[in-house]
Image: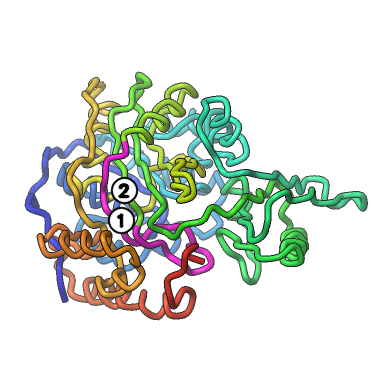
């Protein structure tokens, strides 16, 4: 089993006064905890229903269990209990899912009495993270987005309801305008993003959503050509003064293709995209955004335009790629919210390969020869990092499970995306 390494394994800025509390339980939560542990040497508390064993058997996580569909009151009770148990600590609340970001925004006044909260307000969140509103903000700022049609399901019970005509040629992409109203639904065949080949398939999707109880807004967008390598990911932090004090980005190499995970990168190369940074920073600062944000952007191969898809009101599932590239995102955030310091902008500038999948699997899906050569060079030079293969983790069971999960990607890709395509679906 190959274990990746970081040249600096001791805390960058050791401190015992902070305690991160992270809601959730997936590898994105582990990434946040790893960032904190590498930066400050601190332990973290995970508040989740079924945290992965990469968390439960980690040497720097303690776990508080919560029911899978906990109400705001139940979650608040746990968080307030944790605060009462640690009066000597400066608490920081983090989360990495739309449901929990919305929970923080709704309860910001109560939570802010005990926790530092690197999140936008509910008003800003609604304006920017609703994908339909986001597209309108981009249009006002002169930033390109995919062609979009909004489908309002709030009046679907009316017999006169009809979905609008779609002006794009098929195939098209369909997805919820907001994360939370869709994430709480459970139905057979659910996907995070829908790739629709025909008008008949789209009609069937509307019936499925109606039966599942969806009553918010769904979007239909033109399908932008290009495979996963045309995607870009941008991570930013806006401090309490409204200044962007952290920025970094990556070229996506491969995304997950399991139905509920579509669109989540599993391999990326860090790379500077100054023009995209400028647009992202403008959207955030002009809308009064605060806290962490993660953008999805695609480069249209037909004309080279950068099309902004969305901004997530959280640090992003693959947040640790920033730390691996030399820009640990927790450092400027702690300096801002805990220490009250204004700091210069930190940029992720080191070229590294961040990957969760075996090298041979990744290379199978990279069809561009120059990009394949670049990936192989980075691997040869020892700049390939896997979030979960952490050299400080000594629990053998944990590390074996992580290694087996890594190999399991072969089975998942064989089932959902056996061969690379020009559109990656």
Q: In terms of sequence position, does the residue under pointer 2 or pointer 1 come before the other?
A: 2
Report if residue 127 lies within the magenta region. Answer: no
Total count of labels: 2
- Whether residue 216 sits left or right of residue 302 in the image: it is right
Q: Name the residue beneath numbered marker 1.
A: 268
Name the secondary structure under disc 1: strand
Whether tag 2 and tag 1 are in contact, CB under 8 A, the answer is: yes
Q: Mark 2 falls on what kind of element?
A: strand
Instruction: Choose between 235 and 28: the one closer to the eye.
Output: 235
Magenta stretch: includes residue 254: yes
* Camera-nearest residue between 86 and 422: 422
Local crowd at mark 1 within 10 Å, few (<14), some, or many (≥20)?
A: many
Query: In x, y percent, where is residue 188?
Result: 64, 71
Residue furthest right in the image = 159
| Residue 280 point in image, percent of width and height | 41, 33
Residue 233, image x, y percentages: 38, 47
Which residues are drawn in magenta?
Answer: 253-273
Quadrant of the rendered image containing residue 115: top left
Q: Which residue is mark 2?
A: 250
CA gap between label 2 and label 1 equals 6 Å
């Amino acid at each position: 089993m190959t274990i990746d390494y970081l040249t600096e394994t001791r805390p960058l800025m050791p401190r015992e006064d902070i305690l991160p509390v992270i809601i959730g339980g997936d590898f994105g939560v582990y990434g946040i905890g790893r960032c904190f542990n590498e930066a400050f040497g601190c332990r973290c508390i995970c508040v989740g229903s079924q945290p992965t064993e990469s968390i439960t058997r980690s040497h720097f996580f303690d776990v508080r269990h919560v029911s899978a569909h906990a109400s705001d009151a139940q979650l608040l009770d746990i968080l307030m209990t944790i605060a009462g148990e640690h009066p000597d600590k400066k608490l920081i609340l983090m989360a990495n899912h739309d449901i929990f970001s919305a929970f923080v925004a709704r309860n910001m006044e109560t939570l802010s009495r005990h926790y530092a909260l690197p999140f936008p307000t509910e008003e800003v969140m609604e304006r920017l993270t609703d994908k339909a509103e986001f597209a309108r903000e981009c249009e006002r700022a002169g930033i390109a987005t995919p062609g979009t049609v909004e489908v309002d399901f709030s009046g679907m019970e009316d017999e006169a309801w009809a979905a609008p005509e779609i002006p794009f040629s098929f195939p098209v992409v369909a997805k919820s305008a907001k994360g939370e109203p869709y994430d709480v639904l459970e139905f057979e065949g659910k996907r995070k993003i829908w790739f629709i080949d025909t008008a008949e398939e789209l009609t069937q999707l509307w019936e499925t959503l109606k039966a599942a109880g969806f009553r918010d807004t769904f979007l239909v967008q033109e399908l932008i050509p290009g495979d996963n390598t045309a995607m870009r990911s941008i991570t930013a932090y806006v401090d309490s003064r409204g200044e962007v004090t952290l920025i970094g980005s990556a070229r996506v190499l491969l995304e997950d293709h399991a139905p509920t995970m579509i669109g989540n990168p599993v391999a990326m190369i860090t790379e500077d995209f100054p023009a995209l940074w400028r647009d992202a920073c403008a959207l955030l600062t002009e809308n009064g955004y605060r806290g962490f944000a993660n953008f999805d952007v695609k480069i249209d191969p037909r004309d080279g335009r950068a099309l902004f898809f969305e901004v997530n009101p959280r640090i992003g599932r693959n947040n640790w790629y920033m730390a691996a590239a030399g820009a640990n995102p927790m450092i400027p955030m702690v300096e801002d919210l805990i220490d009250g310091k204004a700091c210069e902008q930190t940029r992720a500038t080191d070229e590294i390969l961040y990957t969760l999948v075996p090298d041979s699997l990744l290379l199978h899906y990279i069809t561009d020869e120059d990009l394949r050569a670049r990936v192989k060079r980075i691997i040869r030079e020892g700049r390939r990092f896997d979030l979960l293969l952490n050299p400080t983790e000594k629990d053998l069971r944990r590390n074996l499970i992580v290694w087996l999960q890594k190999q399991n990607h072969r089975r998942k890709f064989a089932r959902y995306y056996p061969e690379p395509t020009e559109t990656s679906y």
